[in-house]
Amino acid sequence: MIIDELKKKISEGYAVVRSRLNDDIKARNSDWTSLQIAAFDGFVDEFVRLMSPEFVDCRTPQQLSLLHIICAGQSDSQVKKVACVLDSCEGDVSKRSSLLSHLSSNGFSALHIAVYKGDLLLVKTLLEEGADPCLGGRHQLPPLHLAAMTGSAPIAQALVTSGASLVANDFVLFTALHCATYFANEQVVRCLLSCGADGNVHGGVKDRPLHLAACRGLSTIVSVLLEAGADPHLPDDEGNLPLHFAAKTGHMAVLNVLLKYSSNVQEMVATRNVYGDTPLHLACYGGRLDATKALITASGSFLMVSENVFSETPLHAACTSGKSIELVAYLMKQPGVDPNYQGRDGHTDISALHSACYHGHLQIVQYLMENGADQSLAAHTSERPSSMQCGSQSTIASAIISLNRPETLSSDVSSRDSIVSIEEQQTPLIWAYEKGHDRIVALLKHYATKRPDTDVCSEYRC
């Protein structure tokens, strides 16, 4: 899913932001002048004594101004130091503005530093003195996003009151509401919504805060967004609803809230993304038994034969992932579910047994065989993989000859007659062989020849 790639980009991007901000707020006494040391953690009287207009523009090797150092510092009198520095501009509006907007080598303003440190008084002071609440710096990171990341609702409120934009985007095209949601900062989410943020605002791939909250299992934030008017029926660029993510991750509290707030549960549960997956498919791919039960309870069993673009029904999906034999057993008990159903909506008509054999899930294969799966069913493909083209047919044929050893063949059947035409049929056994799942191959052969009273459970159970 696109959002999975986006989450990685967000995580990596904001990790870089944190690292560089942490670098900017470090004390570097060995490299600093007496004035800069006093700005960081000295007494205000000492700082005032050392300060003069000629030092207003002094910078460290990291391009930290006196305002940066003051905002990074640890003294109780930092606000007075800010006033001292700005007073030293002697009414020069241009110099004052330049100082407030100056960026460190890492790309941050003094306001960024104050927001990151969580110093509300310093933030308000800088804003009152003319700091731009929308200045993103070189990282395209507005201060409001930084407050959303760190979780300070009072600072977020101060920034919005001073003109920070609720619709500005960061480097991953997130708004501040996206950011607060992603970092699970509920109070900032509430603050932004109360300030007028749109709960349905979308990011670069039409990902909405509700998608992020559902994906991360943030049930309280999901409820807050829904109560504020967020629409659970809006899809992202891949057609995923928030319910798709809740089903995939198995966050039951989120899933139940989304179903509760839906204006049309049947429509929501049946919604397909661009891959043809319903939320039920994703629950089955994820091995999420509880989510599967909840979705079937909400929609009925009509989705059990719904196929995605890979010709896979929910049962196929569970057998493909192989994460839960209990899930497979539950699906097999649903009305209308046939273990020998072959998908027909895509380019391959495969059975659930094909899926389990291809992916090497021995226990699932055994369960299917014990519950009516037919290993003689063949998949017919309209587009053969290159390994299945006629050029390799002799290789497959030789493999089947070796698999069908003399003891498994009747005396009047020749090896030539036992060869299955790969151009016409692809059985689960062939698929298992092609993928190198030898134990499954042996298991299928055993089922093909075993007597009714034979018990293979102990021999093949993982």
Image: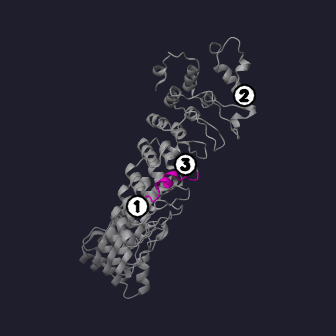
- Is label 2 in a helix, a strand or a loop? loop
User: x and y percent of residue 390 in the render?
Assistant: 75, 32
Image: 331 above or below 234: above
Q: Which residue is under mark 3? A: 277
Task: Please tell me which residue is depicted at 61% across the width and 42% down the height of the picture.
Answer: 311
Task: Please tell me which residue is depicted at 38% across the width and 65% down the height of the picture.
Answer: 148
The amino acid type, in three-letter code, at marker 2 is Ser
In 3D space, how far apart are the residues under numbered discs 1 and 2 (Cα atoms)? 56 Å
The amino acid type, in three-letter code, at marker 1 is Thr
Image: 268 above or below 384: below
Image: 34 above or below 403: below
Q: Is residue 268 shown to the viewer in this render? A: yes
Label 2 near label 1: C-beta < 8 Å?
Answer: no
User: x and y percent of residue 17 in the render?
Assistant: 43, 61
Q: Which residue is under mark 2? A: 421
Q: How crowded is mark 3: few (under 14 residues within 10 Å), some or many (20 or more)?
A: many
Let me know if residue 354 is in the magenta part: no
Q: Is residue 15 shown to the viewer in this render? A: no
The amino acid type, in three-letter code, at marker 3 is Asp
Label 2 near label 3: C-beta < 8 Å?
Answer: no
Q: Residues within 10 Å of mark 1 (few under 14, many from 20)?
A: many
User: x and y percent of residue 152 in the render?
Assistant: 33, 66
- The answer to whether residue 200 is left or right of residue 27 is right
User: x and y percent of residue 21 in the render?
Assistant: 40, 63
- Is label 1 in a helix, a strand or a loop? helix
In 3D space, how far apart are the residues under numbered discs 1 and 3 (Cα atoms)? 26 Å
Q: Quadrant of residue 374?
A: top right
In 3D space, how far apart are the residues under numbered discs 3 and 2 (Cα atoms)? 33 Å
Query: Which sits in the foreground, 137 or 441?
Result: 441
Query: Which sits in the foreground, 47 or 439?
Result: 439
**Residue segment shown in magenta:** 262-274
- Is label 3 in a helix, a strand or a loop? loop
